[in-house]
Image: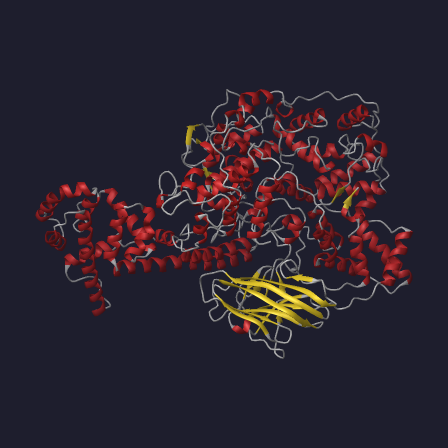
């Protein structure tokens, strides 16, 4: 789904469907606080708030928005057409586009549109204090709440069946069953048990050899299963499986969130993922595991320690357009909710409504993370290193891209200096304007004086620096200028006569400067600047003439004029601009941002994808001077309350807590979170691990242990496991082992009608819960049984939908925050925008269609078929079917299954070559006729769209591609992009649709709607315009086609467009059918399967394969 549609859909759901806001606000007010207020602060209030009110407009309260500015009210509730703010952000009705330098993204515009539609909600400060949460009463309630109680090891209960309750876990569970009048289910058989445990521990199916070894082990069940668990916990796949759960908590992704012209990829995010895998496999104590993820730089014993990668926990999150307040909020949430189950972020704007978290505590933690920053260069770490050959090739390619970046800076600096030389009077005049007006008006200065932003800004900044230093006030050339600029205008005018006398009498002043000032007698600072401007112009013109006469000239013949030239052009002169300052200044305008973005992306491309790139850690470091934060009233940047120290939460450390004193305080925070007397951390991790083995936690909430959380079903068991975890050195593997070896875990899923009546949700665990494989386990199982799984541990991410399909484990999927892979999007993948303790579990048609139709599944079925081998019939076919069942289910077929499989194969038809589908995407000449309709299919499917090949832009076809909502033509009219609908049968159709070019740049596009006979139903030249596609009563025969053809119209720039074609059958065999290019857009159809491969695919779709008993 495109970003805009996703945003609009999501916004609508948030506003219309939320039953209640987490902090007591109405859903509309929550929408404002979460989306509108941050957007106004970040994008609007720099120029329209208390300090600055351009056009007399303030956008920092509802009352002031309704009051408006010079043009009238800025918005009208529920009236999007009459709201000037919406016209301004779209640049409509003659209004200047706002913000002028960096227009809003479509999703941001959608936020403000929705805000207007729902009536401009703005939570007021007049809300009664009681509604904000009585922290005194809440804190008293917390003293009695189960999650805040100290953890004390409970006594192990005596039970009615000591032979069953062989472990403390079983004793607590059996006690609950006895009290409820329930009995535990029988144990699962060995085949079921090893499959369950192998998936639970490693995320993979057991091999036939593993099953046979366990099933045939003569040892008693307990000893035999202990050996299985020891092997599984020691396998490297354990860390991979359980890393996935942790990465959901850490909101892991390989990209940042969307920002125009920004490099979105995190090239080294994978090093954090690999750290998590390695730590879990090594059974790193959980307290150290947590501590390193907050403060690894404090614990590392070397600057290249691999543990530094742990800091990715804080840095792989979204960047929120570099909004520091939002970034800190994100870190506070992932740390407090992710590690302790407290929703501290709800105290950002006011005291928490329900939990003992005053807003001061939020800003104490804000101070910790606001006192950190991501360094410009990430450190190389001592992790798995590439080969020498890969390193050499990487260094060569990287040097080439870096050289292009450096050359860009040098060329830009040269251009800036040349423009200063050509227009020095204008730059001096521009500088004067900058000294008397706000710097925010730089764009007006650029327009007024016709100067370049990449020269004006660094020139002015350097001149300011020289004036402030005072070191040049006695300089022979620049002294008078520095003296005058050091004063405000009234002070200069007062001292001007004295300056005139001083300069006239000076024995050290440059004679030409002296003569100029004596002649001009500048009585204002502006006149002084103007005099120097004309003086500089004259000298530079003389230098240009000298160079024209003698290209080898190195200086002017006149020594006094040469001194002025050197003051401008010499090393350290006024025109000796810093290249970094020039490059930074160029980003003021969009064109340079795009150019610089492309050059930086080229560097990141090499660093992100080249196998020879050294691994780096996504660290953050403390700033030199940590901040003492102020509470932001209502969370508003410009409303500051009292300052608070950086310190831990009051509910967990009490009134005698001490402020953090070491740097930002990250290490002190980490050690407070993992302290033995913190009752939340160990309870939370135990509850989450328990939930993975039983489908639900002992406490139902996995990420909120606040006052609204329900008590655990077995509170003593939760405390027993939490205290045991700490007593055993925070060993997670010991916790896993305790759970896995319990009879509670080893129960069967057998139904029991009587127990169902007493405990339908199985909270008392009278049986094991049947669970569906999550996406990662399902995909990995498909790869495993097809013999195509790459079990390499660690490494860079892969795009799951790339063709050929990668065979790495799903853990290594490339997670794109902006465009999530379609496979992941279909199967309830965790959001990478916030910490996720449990995924939603849905059953939707797209999931079933994936299993039945996706080429990846078909490819796995084909590989299984080829590995097993298919024969002509008889005993060989019977053996093949048995081998197929053994490979997929690790068991032989039952007689009934054997007969059904044989009947299926006997009735199946050999694979027939399929057509290429109702919709086709390709390219060809723009001019179409019935006899000449050349069409070359776009054969490369990226997983999201069609393009010419794996390289983009394509060397021959450029940016030619087709997406679900639009596309881009090639470089000539012979490379028009074509969307083709092929009639599946004879009939009559009605055609509707739209084509839109939405950019005010380039020369636009040429679009055509071509009918089956080659005639055109319409032709349009579009530049920042749209057209309707329409045709009535069009007769088609099976195999004929309708085309939408779009070419570049001349210049192949800014030609991206949107299209949609809808066809409705009105007569014939297709009457009543409808085709929509957007909703129908999909991957190319999979190749046809032979009957035996069809049987393999059918078995892969069974509950036995997709569920755990």
Which residue is more in the foreground, 1010 or 831? 1010
Is residue 861 left or right of 812 when viewed as pictured?
A: right
Location of residue 586 by image quarter:
bottom left
Above or below 330: residue 943: below
Above or below 739: residue 35: below
Can residue 61 be seen in the rendering of this structure? no
Locate residue 573, reporting x and y percent: 25, 53
Total marks drawn? 0
Above or below 37: residue 781: below
Report the quarter where the C terminus lies: top right
Location of residue 949 by image quarter:
bottom right
Is residue 951 left or right of 894 when viewed as pictured?
A: left
Is residue 126 left or right of 747 when viewed as pictured?
A: left
Locate residue 28, reporting x and y percent: 55, 39
Is residue 527 left or right of 788 when viewed as pictured?
A: left
Locate residue 228, reporting x and y percent: 77, 40
Can residue 1034 be seen in the rendering of this structure? yes
Location of residue 704 by image quarter:
top right
Which residue lies at the image location 45% right of the left edge and 38% below the top edge? 62
Which residue is more in the foreground, 358 or 811? 358
Which residue is more in the foreground, 479 or 847? 847
Which residue lies at the image location 86% right of the left edge and 39% below the top edge? 218
Which residue lies at the image location 64% right of the left edge and 56% below the top edge? 801
Locate residue 106, reporting x and y percent: 51, 52
Which residue lies at the image location 41% right of the left edge and 53% below the top edge? 97
Which residue is more in the foreground, 309 or 332? 332
């Amino acid at each position: 789904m495109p970003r805009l549609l996703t945003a609009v859909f999501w916004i609508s759901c948030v506003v219309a469907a939320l039953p209640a806001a987490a902090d007591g606000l109405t859903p509309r007010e929550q929408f404002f606080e979460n989306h509108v207020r941050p957007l106004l602060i970040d994008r609007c209030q720099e120029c329209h708030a208390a300090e600055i009110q351009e056009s007399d407009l303030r956008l920092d309260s509802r009352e002031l928005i309704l009051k408006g500015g010079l043009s009238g009210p800025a918005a009208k509730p529920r009236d999007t057409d009459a709201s000037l703010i919406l016209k301004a952000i779209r640049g409509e009705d003659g209004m200047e586009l706002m913000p002028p330098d960096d227009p809003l993204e479509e999703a941001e515009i959608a936020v403000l549109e929705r805000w207007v539609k729902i009536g401009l909600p703005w939570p007021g400060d007049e809300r009664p204090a009681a509604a904000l949460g009585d922290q005194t009463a809440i804190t008293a309630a917390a003293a009695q709440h189960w999650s805040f109680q100290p953890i004390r090891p409970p006594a192990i209960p005596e039970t009615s069946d000591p032979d069953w309750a062989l472990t403390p876990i079983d004793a607590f569970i059996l006690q609950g069953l006895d009290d409820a009048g329930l009995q535990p289910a029988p144990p699962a058989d060995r085949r079921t048990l090893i499959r369950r445990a192998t998936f639970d521990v490693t995320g993979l199916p057991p091999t036939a050899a593993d099953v046979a070894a366990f099933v045939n082990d003569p040892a008693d069940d307990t000893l035999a299963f202990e050996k299985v668990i020891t092997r599984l916990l020691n396998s490297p796949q354990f860390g991979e499986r359980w890393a996935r759960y942790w990465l959901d908590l850490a909101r892991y992704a390989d990209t940042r969130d969307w920002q125009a012209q920004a490099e979105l990829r995190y090239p080294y995010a994978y090093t954090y993922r690999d750290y998590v895998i390695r730590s879990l496999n090594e059974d790193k104590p959980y307290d150290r595991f947590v501590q390193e993820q907050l403060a690894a730089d404090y614990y590392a014993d070397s600057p290249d320690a691999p543990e530094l990668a742990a800091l990715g926990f804080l840095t792989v999150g979204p960047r929120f357009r570099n909004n520091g307040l939002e970034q800190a909020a994100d870190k506070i949430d992932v740390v407090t909710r992710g590690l302790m189950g407290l929703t501290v972020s709800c105290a950002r704007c006011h005291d928490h409504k329900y939990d003992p978290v005053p807003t001061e505590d939020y800003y104490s933690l804000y101070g910790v993370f606001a006192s950190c920053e991501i360094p410009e260069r990430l450190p190389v770490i001592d992790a798995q290193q590439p080969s020498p050959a890969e390193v050499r090739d990487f260094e060569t390619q990287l040097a080439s891209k870096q050289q292009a970046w450096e050359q860009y800076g040098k060329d830009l600096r040269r251009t800036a200096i040349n423009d200063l030389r050509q227009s020095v009077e204008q730059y001096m005049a521009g500088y004067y304007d900058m000294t008397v007006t706000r710097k925010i008006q730089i764009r007006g200065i650029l327009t007024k004086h016709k100067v370049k932003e990449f020269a004006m800004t660094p020139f002015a900044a350097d001149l300011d620096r020289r004036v402030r230093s005072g070191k040049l006030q006695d300089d022979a050339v620049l002294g008078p200028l520095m003296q005058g600029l050091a004063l405000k205008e009234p002070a200069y005018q007062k001292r001007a006569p004295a300056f005139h006398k001083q300069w006239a009498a000076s024995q050290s002043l440059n004679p030409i400067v002296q003569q100029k000032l004596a002649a001009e007698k500048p009585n204002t600072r502006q006149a002084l600047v103007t005099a120097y401007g004309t003086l500089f112009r004259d000298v530079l013109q003389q230098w240009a003439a000298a160079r024209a006469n003698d290209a080898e000239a190195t200086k002017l013949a006149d020594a006094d004029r040469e001194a002025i030239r050197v003051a401008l052009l010499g090393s350290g002169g006024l025109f000796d601009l810093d290249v970094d300052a020039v490059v930074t200044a160029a980003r003021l305008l969009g064109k340079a941002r795009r150019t610089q973005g492309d050059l930086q992306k080229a560097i990141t491309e090499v660093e992100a994808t080249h196998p020879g790139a050294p691994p780096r850690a996504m660290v953050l470091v403390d700033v030199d001077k940590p901040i003492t934060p102020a509470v932001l009233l209502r969370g508003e940047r410009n409303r500051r309350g009292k300052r608070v120290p950086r310190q831990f939460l009051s509910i967990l450390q009490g009134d005698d807590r001490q402020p953090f004193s070491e740097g930002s305080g990250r290490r002190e925070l980490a050690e407070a979170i993992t302290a033995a007397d913190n009752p939340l951390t160990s309870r939370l991790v135990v509850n989450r691990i328990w939930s993975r083995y039983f489908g639900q936690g002992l406490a139902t909430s996995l990420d909120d242990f606040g006052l609204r959380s329900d008590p655990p079903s077995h509170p003593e068991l939760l405390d027993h496991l939490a205290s045991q975890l700490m007593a055993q050195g925070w060993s997670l593997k010991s916790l896993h082992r305790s759970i896995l070896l319990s009879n509670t875990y080893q129960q069967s899923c057998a139904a029991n009608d009587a127990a169902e009546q007493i405990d339908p949700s199985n909270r008392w665990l009278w049986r094991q819960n049947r669970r569906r494989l999550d996406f990662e386990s399902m995909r990995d199982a498909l790869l495993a049984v097809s013999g195509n799984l790459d079990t390499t541990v660690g490494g860079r991410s892969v795009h799951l939908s790339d063709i050929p399909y990668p065979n790495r484990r799903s853990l290594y999927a490339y997670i794109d925050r902006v465009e999530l892979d379609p496979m992941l999007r279909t199967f309830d993948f965790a959001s990478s925008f916030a910490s996720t303790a449990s995924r939603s579990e849905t059953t939707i048609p797209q999931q079933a269609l994936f299993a039945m139709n996706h080429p990846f599944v078909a490819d796995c079925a084909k590989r299984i078929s080829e590995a097993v081998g298919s024969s002509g019939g008889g005993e060989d076919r019977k053996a093949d079917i048995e081998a197929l069942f053994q490979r997929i289910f690790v068991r032989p077929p039952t007689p009934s299954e054997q007969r059904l499989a044989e009947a299926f194969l006997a009735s199946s038809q050999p694979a027939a070559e399929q057509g290429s589908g109702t919709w086709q995407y390709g390219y060809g000449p723009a001019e179409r006729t019935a006899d000449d309709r050349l069409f070359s299919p776009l054969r490369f499917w990226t997983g999201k769209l069609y393009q010419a090949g794996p390289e983009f832009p394509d060397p021959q076809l450029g940016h030619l591609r087709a997406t679900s909502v639009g596309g881009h033509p090639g470089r000539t009219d012979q490379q028009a992009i074509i969307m083709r609908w092929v009639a599946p049968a004879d009939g009559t159709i009605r055609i509707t649709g739209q084509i839109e070019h939405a950019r005010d740049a380039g020369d636009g596009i040429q679009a055509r709607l071509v009918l089956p006979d080659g005639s055109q139903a319409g032709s349009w030249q579009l530049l920042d315009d749209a057209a309707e596609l329409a045709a009535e009563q069009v007769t088609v025969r099976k195999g004929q086609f309708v085309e939408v053809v779009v070419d570049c119209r001349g210049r192949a720039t800014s030609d991206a467009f949107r299209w949609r074609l809808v066809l409705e059958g009105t007569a014939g065999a297709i009457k009543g059918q409808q085709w929509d290019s957007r909703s129908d857009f999909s991957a190319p159809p999979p190749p046809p399967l032979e009957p035996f491969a069809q049987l393999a695919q059918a078995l892969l779709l069974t509950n036995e394969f997709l569920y755990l008993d």
